[in-house]
Image (tube, helix red, strand yellow):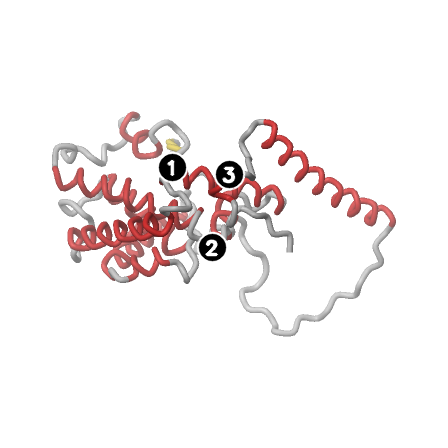
Amino acid sequence: MSDIIPYVESGTYVACNNENGGVIECLKKDGIVDLDNGYQSVPEWISMKALISSWLEEALIYELWVGSDGNSVRKIYYPDLAWPIGKVLFLQQVRTVKQQLGITKENSDRREEEIYNRASIAYRALSTRLGEESFLFENRPSSVDAILLAHVLVTLHALPETSLLKSKLLEHGNLVRYAEKLKTEFVEAGSSSSIPPFPSDPSSSTPRKGPSHWSSKPKPKPKREKTEEEKTFRRRAKYFLATQLVAIVLFLSVMNIYDISEPELDNEGDIDFD
């Protein structure tokens, strides 16, 4: 799984997002800053936060796990896992997400249309509220700006170009400009000190080495004959990969978690080893 945990650092103070309530609540409890001071009783602030935390969050979860081939979530959550294990865990999570969203074989088309329609409504409402301002409320940031920024950046940078949710977001240029401006001012500006920049590719958790421009025809390296020790290691690695797959399938079967007879996985749950 990905070992990159979002955090905020200021001097010797660090607030990690895996703490109870996340970064925003940690900053408030520790007396650093209360982003929502004076907003909790503002009806429009409450409704905007509810839109992002329900309709847009639902749409993003659907797109990542159900409405895609799984490449995005693999890069984000488990880039280092062996393919068979990642595939099994992906299928299990797809099943869980479908249950959470109330999706069945009978209503899948209707629920998909409903999810994307709600996302469109939410984007229009947020775009209208923002206009050309720097923040959603009173020209100062709140937790609504934080969660909207996170949603927009993930949608823009983690989802593929064919994403329907991304295309709906791109219809609202002010939301895209708003997110890119905040990314530049608050995320990338802090990268020179302690806050890491948001990567354009979720899988790029380690810096690339070497020059940025490469020759189109690199010189081929001379092939080296593998030693008997290396050949033995490769054979053992293949056996280990196979036992990983068998072990996890047996575990999920025994614990009654992974049930291939479930109707939701009849079509999309088959594992393709091509």
Marks 2 and 3 sit apart, C-alpha to C-alpha, by 34 Å
* Other residues around mark 3 within 10 Å, as few (<14) / some (14–19) / many (≥20): few
Tally the marks: 3
**In the picture, which quadrant includes the C terminus?**
bottom right
Query: Which mark lies nearer to you, 1 or 3?
Result: 3
- Residue furthest toward the right? 228
The label nearer to you, 1 versus 2, is 1
Query: Quarter-wise, where is residue 209 in the image?
Result: bottom right
Q: Amino acid at mark 2?
A: Asp
> What is the crowding at mark 1: few (fewer than 14 residues within 10 Å), some, or many (at least 20)?
few
Which residue position is annotated with label 3?
A: 262
Answer yes or no: do the residues labelled 2 and 3 have beta carbons within 8 Å? no
What's the distance in space between the residues labelled 1 and 3, CA to CA? Answer: 15 Å
Nearest the viewer among 265 and 17 is 265
**Is there CB contact under 8 Å for labels 1 and 3?**
no
- The residue under label 3 is which amino acid type? Glu
Per the image, the residue denoted by label 1 is 100
Q: Is residue 57 above or below residue 164?
A: above
In the rendered image, residue 199, in percent from the top left (x then y), is placed at 44, 52
Q: Mark 2 or 3, which is nearer the eye?
A: 3
Q: Considering depth in this image, is 29 or 81 the residue closer to the camera? A: 81
The residue carrying mark 2 is 201
Q: Is residue 102 visible?
A: yes
| CA–CA distance in space, label 1 to label 2 | 28 Å
Could you say where residue 103 lies in the image, as x and y percent from the top left? 38, 43
- Left or right side of 243 for 202: left
Q: Residue at x 34, y 34 (%)?
A: 23
Q: What SS does tag 3 mark? A: loop
From what the image shows, is residue 67 above or below residue 39?
Answer: below
